[in-house]
Amino acid sequence: MLDTYFKISERGSTVGREIRGGIVTFFTMAYIVALNPLIIGLSKDADGKFLGGGDAPNLALIAAATALIAGVLTILMGVVANFPLAIATGLGLNTFVAVGIASKMTWADAMGLIVIEGIIITVLVLTGFRTAVFRAVPTQLKIAISVGIGLFIALIGLVDAGFVRRTGSGPVPVTLGDGGTLVGWPIIVFAFGLFLMIGLMVKKVKGALLIGIGLATVAAIAIESAFKIGPNFIAPDKVNPKGWGLNVPTIPSKIVATPDFGLLGHFNLFGSFSRITAVSAILLVFTLLLADFFDTMGTMTAIGHEAGLVDREGNVPNANKILFVDSIAAAAGGAAGISSNTSYIESASGVGEGARTGLASVVTGICFLLTTFLAPLVAVIPYEAATPALVIVGFLMMTQIKSIDWDDFGIAIPAFLTIILMPFTYSISVGIGAGFVSHVVIRLIQGRRKEIHPLLLVVSALFIVYFLSSPINAWTS
């Protein structure tokens, strides 16, 4: 039944591979259950209240809702779209919501804007517009998007592990480790996990990434038990450069905890329009919409190419279903009070483990649902044990770069900008936008207007508005 429904054999996979892939994807993105509460749970809204309406943060409330929505929507992605793609609260978007939206209104009002954005983007899918835009993009630009995302997630892995860090001052934005030096046991754990995964992959051992994460976590627990390293972040003005990045890997005192889902339904659909001008509210929705629209398109493209699930034009099967579930996820995230949910590029780690169908997403979703009860157990896995998988997957996605025609400037320059701007700006949407706009401009200069799809002209114009949204917002205000 599983093989028939999910087309496992047809896609060259097995049930075992799908289960392993689903578990690996979960481990590489489980950090969101702990990280999302830290991003949106510690910020106050315009009324000085924390998310949930209280005078003090309630991180457990946010963590439970984050895991619940991620689990339900990821299972929906697997069952409806049959694609190995996991969903959770969007990083970057949640920061924008906390800093750029909730600071101007109540948390409920901010979540209402996200629900509006999710409804709009769902309508765009149902009308076929979102899928049409995806098909209007040249095949080689789709490949560039995949390669750029590969570099992006590799950088995410290096930064989260502490191998690459911000300098804090001076002309150079990032550096090796702490001030140009690798320090601390966590880096040793990262290196151990990375080379272990490389060795297992070279030897073609099944479950290489999952084994690597597991053994690196065991090593981290042993090291923390012996040396009492502690967390990297101690206080806003105090940092331990030799500490663990997010989770401190210690054996938990308890494994099961009762979740509280009281945050669900914490949104006010049109409350924002009474707190800020209508133009400002519309621009905020537009910014959320464009980021959601193209982040998912890029992620879907990258996963499709890595899994070998694209046709000759680079189109992904069931694209409309994938985008539909993702659109619902945006609205669901707002309705649950945890910010917009979107597709996660970390899903590529599961694909690297062999996942090719929606069964892997079902497995990942079940893991997230279990996390609502097993949060103490998930908290054992540190960044440094999970992030080597992202570096490995970044390499795998980078190999697609050979399919780009570097002799055609109309493709090569946009591809180059797409690839470098994703990691350099820490944004998938920015890379896609720069690639689209430059492709249109170069083709117009070359006098090859007929090669530009009309939808690509429209989208490029929208991206120009997106890039200029800050001055436009300041001017209208």
Image: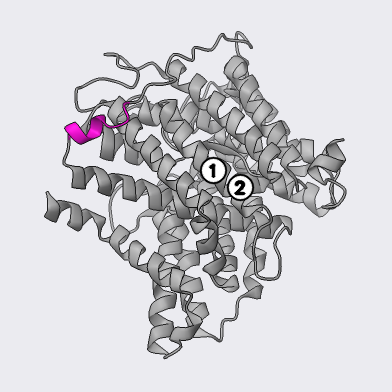
Among the 4 quarters of the image, the one containing residue 100: top left
Residue 48: horizontal and vertical position, in percent?
Answer: 21, 22
Q: Which residue has dot 1 on it? A: 326
Q: Which segment is the magenta one?
A: 268-275
Looking at the image, which residue is at 21% across and 35% down?
A: 273
Q: Which mark, residue 379?
A: none
Mark yes or no: residue 76 visible: yes
Q: Nearer the viewer, residue 14 or 282?
A: 282
Marks 1/2: CA distance?
Answer: 6 Å
Residue 246: horizontal and vertical position, in percent?
Answer: 49, 30
Q: Is residue 357 above or below residue 471?
A: above
Looking at the image, which residue is at 56% across and 53% down?
A: 299
- Determine the secondary structure under disc 2: helix
Q: Amino acid at mark 2?
A: Ile
Residue 115: horizontal and vertical position, in percent?
Answer: 39, 35
Among the 4 quarters of the image, the one containing residue 384: top right
Residue 185: horizontal and vertical position, in percent?
Answer: 56, 34
Please tell me how crowded label 2 is: few (under 14), some (14-19), or many (20+) other residues with Cα within 10 Å. Answer: many
Q: Which residue has dot 2 on it? A: 322
Q: Nearer the viewer, residue 103 or 378?
A: 103
Mark yes or no: residue 232 visible: no
